Image (cartoon, helix red, strand yellow):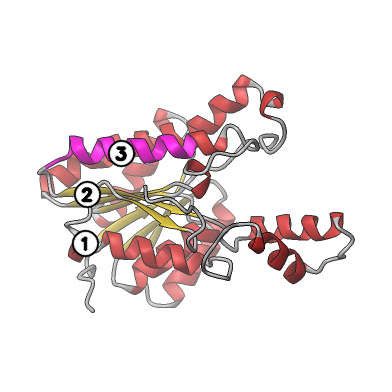
Amino acid sequence: MDLQLKGKRALVTGSNGGIGAAIAQALADEGVSVVLHGRNEEKLAAAEAEISGRGGAVASAAGDLSTDEGAHGVAAKAVDAFGGIDILVNNAGGASETGGGSWFDLAPSEWAATYQSNVISAGRLIHQVVPGMKADGWGRIIQISSAAGIIPTSGQPDYGPSKAALVNMSMGLSKALAGSGITVNTVSPGMIMTDKLVEFLRRFAEKRGWGDDVDRATDYVLKGTGQTVTRIGQVEDVAYAVTMLASPNSGFINGVNLHLDGGGTGSIY
C-alpha cells in the first residue's frame, strides 16, 4: 500500500536514538523529509548519518524543549530545513532519575521537571507548528505516551500521570482542531526493547543471581505483564504505528490512543 507520505515534512523530537530514531527512519523510508531532534549533537549527527546513508532526506535541530526559547529555536530550525512541518511527533521526554522508588520520596521539583519534559514541552511545539499546518489545511500530530499512563502503578509516580496528561491533551487538541485537516493521535507503547529496558533487565537478572542472563530476565518479566503477544515490543513496532497514523490514508483516525503493548493493558478504553 502506498502511504502517500512522499514529500511530507516531519519533526520527530527525541530522535537521536531508540524509539524516536526508529520513527524517523520509518518516515524517511516512506519518502518523508525528516528533522531529527535531541540535545546531544554527537548522537544527532550519528542518527542523521544513518538515515542519509539509506537515501533519506534528513536534517537536525538540536535544542532544549524545556524553555519557550529552546522550543522556538528547534521549531524554527525544523521549518527552515525543509520549508515547513506537516507531521509533528512528540516523542521527547522521560522520568525523573529518582522517580522509580516510593511515591512519597519524589520531591515536588521532580514532579514539575517530569511534567515539563513530557507535557509542557509537547505543548510548546504544538503552538509553534499548528499555525503552519492550519494554513496548509493538513497536518498530523502524534504524541508518544506510555502504557504507564493507562495502568497506574505505585512506582514512578511522576511518569505515569504525566503520560496520562499527554493522552488527555491529545484528545482535547483533536477537538480544538476539528475541521482543520489536522489530526491528533496518541501511541502508548508497553515494554519496548530499548537500551534503557536492556539495562533494566540486566540489573533485574543480577539481583536474582542470574548473572547477565537478559533472556531469562526477559522471560520472567514478560510472564508478569499480562500480554497476549508473547514477545517484547521492538522500536520498529512503534515506528510502524506512527507511520500509519501519519499517512493521509489515516485521515479518519482522530483523537485515538493506540495501545501498542502486545495486549498488556487488558482494557477496552
Residue 121 visible in the picture: no
Residue annotated with mark 1? 250
Badge 3: residue crowd in 10 Å (few <14, some 14–19, many ≥20): some
What percent of the width, then of the height, locates residue 76?
Answer: 32, 42
Query: What residue is shown with label 3?
Result: 126
The overriding secondary structure of the stretch rendered in magenta is: helix
Viewer-nearest of discs 2 and 3: 2
Q: Nearer the viewer, mark 3 or mark 1?
A: 1
Q: Mark 2 or mark 3: which comes first in sequence?
A: 3
Vertical side of 144 occupied by 191: above or below: below
Left or right: where does residue 22 sit relative to residue 110?
Answer: left
Left or right of residue 41: residue 6: left
> Dividing the picture into quarters, in which one does residue 192 lie?
bottom right
Q: Residue 196 at what x, y percent from top left?
A: 65, 55
Up the image or down, 123 lies above or below 21; here it is above
Q: Which residue is mark 2?
A: 183
Whether pointer 2 and pointer 1 mark residues with C-beta atoms closer than 8 Å, the reply is yes
Identify which amino acid the numbered label 1 is placed on. Ser
Pick the residue in front: 145 or 139: 145
- Residue 120 at x, y percent in the picture: 42, 31
Residue at disc 1, secondary structure: helix
Residues 235 and 168: in front is 168
Instruction: Give the CA distance from mark 3 to mark 1.
Output: 20 Å
User: What label sits on residue 47 in the rendered view?
Assistant: none
Asked if the residues shown at circle 2 and circle 3 are in contact, with their CB atoms under 8 angstroms apart, the answer is no
Q: Find the magenta span and give its range.
A: 162-178
Residue 73 position in % (x across, y down): 38, 38
Q: Is residue 36 magenta?
A: no
Q: Earlier in the sequence, mark 3 or mark 1?
A: 3
- Name which of mark 2 and mark 1 comes first in the sequence: 2
